[in-house]
Image: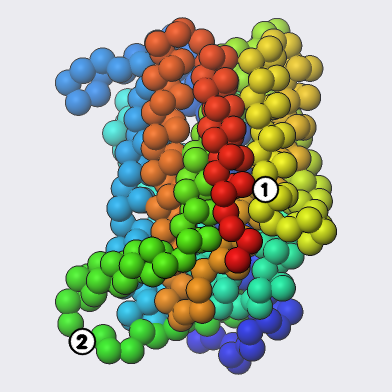
Amino acid sequence: MGSITLVKGSKKLLNAWAFYDWANSVYSLVIASAIFPIFYGALFRSANIEKVVLFGGEIARGPLISYVTSAAFLFIAIITPLLSGVADYLGNKKLFLKFFCYLGGVSCMGLYWFSLENIHFGLLCYFFGLVGFWVSFAFNNSYLPDIAFPEQQDGISAKGFSMGYIGSVILLLFNLAMVMKPDFFGITSDGGEIAEIKAMKYSFLSVGIWWMLFSQYTFYHLPKGNKKEGLKEHVFLNGFGELKSVWRQLGKEVRLKRYLGAFFVYSMAVQTVMLIATYFGEEEIGWGSDNERTIGLIISILVIQIVAILGATLTAKASKAFGNIKTLIVVNILWIAICIYAYFVVTPTDFYIAAGCVGIVMGGIQALSRSTYSKFIPETKDTTSFFSFYDVSEKIGIVIGTFMYGFIAQLTGSMRNATIFLGVFFIIGAFLLTRVPKK
């Protein structure tokens, strides 16, 4: 049962929407950015192997996780618009939001059983964790124009990201304490599994529980969604028909179309940085020991999250003063400088400085990109289908970005060279943003 229907723009409704960021951001921090990449590397290092036999062939750990990530995002890019069209027809996108939240949460908990002997099951949990996070995130994003007026969207979008950073940092600090002091939490080594690895597995359980538990507040207050009139049969085909209609509307919406083009290019680089930052730090930075590596990487991720709260707030204020597009152009230019700096990063201190710089621009570019798109879409009740285009652009960009990054790193033998390649995408993104008309 839901609560009394809250009116559009009401404080309680806006906060309930933003609170989903608090619930689900623990996945992107603990699983995608911090603990899982370290756990994944430690698993292979403790077994003293670099390759596993999978599907009849040998594959190294780096390309393996990269391919699974690319496959997951390709799957996400295909199903998101399909399900979004269906949700608009059924008038119940909350049902889809709930399903993919629970799919992601259960998959995170399934990572507890991730092992080299159980690699197929573990990779499947990793795959569906990604799917659950990103598809539920897409449905939550699509609520923005439904629950907030245009003048409220920049502020509440930034608040959502900020709440996500705060919540995820709290859980990561708890998980970090478990990993560094497992004895204090009663976690001991057994059966050949060291206590630190076991503590990381417990952190995966905590993510799933946190995500599903805190999302209940959002589910309680959000409306079901706008019902599309005229639904008869062939729901899936109707969904594709709805997307065709949105595609035709995009032809007339020059500003929206050009913005989507720019977003596709620079988001490709932003998301790739977020996905590979920890792997870059693990491989390219001169850490003194495994223990220093674990602490250093998690501290770097924490720095990014904490500074990103400030970044999201400053960017929202800058957009009010100078406009969304001008602010996004400046943020892209700052990203270019960071990519150049990353090429020369060697010591842990260098990496911490880079992390701080990334935090300032990461929170800002994500929050502002989401609210800018929301402002640019035409007056319509079919917001889910419009937001699916936004999300599909992002996901296809991730597939291309992660593949190209890995390819260049493999070709040149260094992840550093790939950072310069990402800088080129920010240059193109900034240029394309200058072509977005004001009206």
Q: Is residue 274 above or below residue 12?
A: above
Q: Which mark is residue 232?
A: 2
Q: Residue 204 in the image: x percent, y percent?
A: 53, 42
Callout 2 amino acid: Lys
The residue under label 1 is 328
Rendering quarter of residue 97 = bottom left
Q: Nearer the viewer, residue 161 or 201?
A: 161
Rendering quarter of residue 91 = bottom left
Q: Residue 324 in the image: x percent, y percent?
A: 69, 56
Residue drawn where x is 32% and y is 39% of the image: 71
Horizontal side of residue 157 vs 244, given as left or right:
right
Residue drawn where x is 70% and y is 41% of the image: 331
Q: Residue 106 in the image: x percent, y percent?
A: 43, 53
Q: Nearer the viewer, residue 435 or 359?
A: 435
Q: In which quadrant will I find the C terminus?
A: bottom right
Horizontal side of residue 82 vs 192, given as left or right:
left
Please, what secondary structure does the residue beneath circle 1 have? helix
User: Which class describes the residues within 10 Å of circle 1: few (<14), some (14-19), or many (20+)?
Assistant: many
Horizontal side of residue 203 vs 71, given as left or right:
right
